[in-house]
Amino acid sequence: MRTFGAVVQALREHAGLSRAEFGLRVGYSKHTIASVEQGRRMPDVALIEAAEALTGETGALRSAALHLSREKGLAAWFRQWAQLEAKALTLWTYECRLIPGLLQSEPYARTLFVNQLPPLEDEQIEAQLTVRLDRQRLLRERPNTAYSFIIEEHLLLRNMGGQDVTRGQLDRLIEVAELRNVEIQVMTLERHSHAGLHGPMRVLETPENKWFGYIEGQESGQLVSDRKVVSILKMRYARMRSQALTLDDSLGLLKRMRGAI
């Protein structure tokens, strides 16, 4: 945090701005800017984005912010998104590789961590598992946030971790799907083509009604703030909603799959 603060200070001074002037133009008090520069305050994403725009869009702050965290168990490239996720008004998630973290049962998540390469130490597994399960509290603690998930049917047919783990994962999905603020839709194998073939994606709306996207690959993740790109992601997700099973049909399929195990 101190190193990040030094980068902010260097860019501010290079722009010829006092802390008060800088704070006024990014929408924060000079005291907040001082706290960030001195490494005493974790900057939020809105401050980082505003500071990037003000200092010439160098990408330095976004890159440096990836390494900020007070919490073990989160990948460096995911931390900015996790901060946004914790305050989101709307969160849309499409996954084709594995069950989204917010929906994973504990045995399912543990299976993923145990089989990770390079192998993790027991302490690392427990740290990552704790953080993942803690994030899931958002679904119940933020009842005014609208969560939407679209998952591929084949994720459940894989039987990740065996039948017992899959059975528990189905129970978790069915339980969460009953929450008023959560929508789960299944993209069936019968749908031979759909708008999500470019890969997994997430889109969210902040309390300031700004939209961000997130695209994750192997050992990397990209926070998307460009409005044109976010608009494309929203367009694709909207089409997928119409291509996946309805909420009732999705819940019915999950229950039938649960009964078949």
Image (spheres, rainbow, N blue to C red):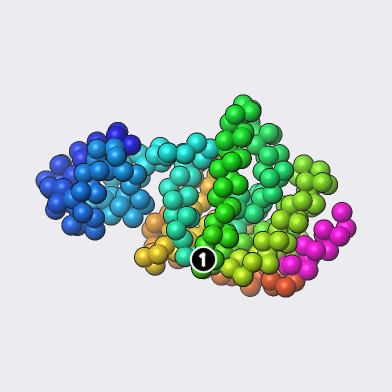
* Left-right relation of 228 to 199: left
Residue 12 placement (x, y as % from top left): 18, 44
Q: Judge by depth and name the residue closer to the eye, 201 or 137.
A: 137
The magenta stretch spans residue 39:
no
* Left-right relation of 221 to 122: left
Circle 1 sits on which residue? 145
* Residue 127 occupies quadrant: top right
Q: Check disc 1 and report its element: helix, strand or loop.
A: loop
Residue 258 placement (x, y as % from top left): 82, 58
The magenta stretch spans residue 251:
yes
| Residue 251 visible in the displayed image | yes
Magenta region: 250-261
Q: Judge by depth and name the residue closer to the eye, 205 or 39.
A: 39
Image position of 227 with respect to 54: above or below: below
- The N terminus, quarter of image: top left
* Left-right relation of 15 to 66: left
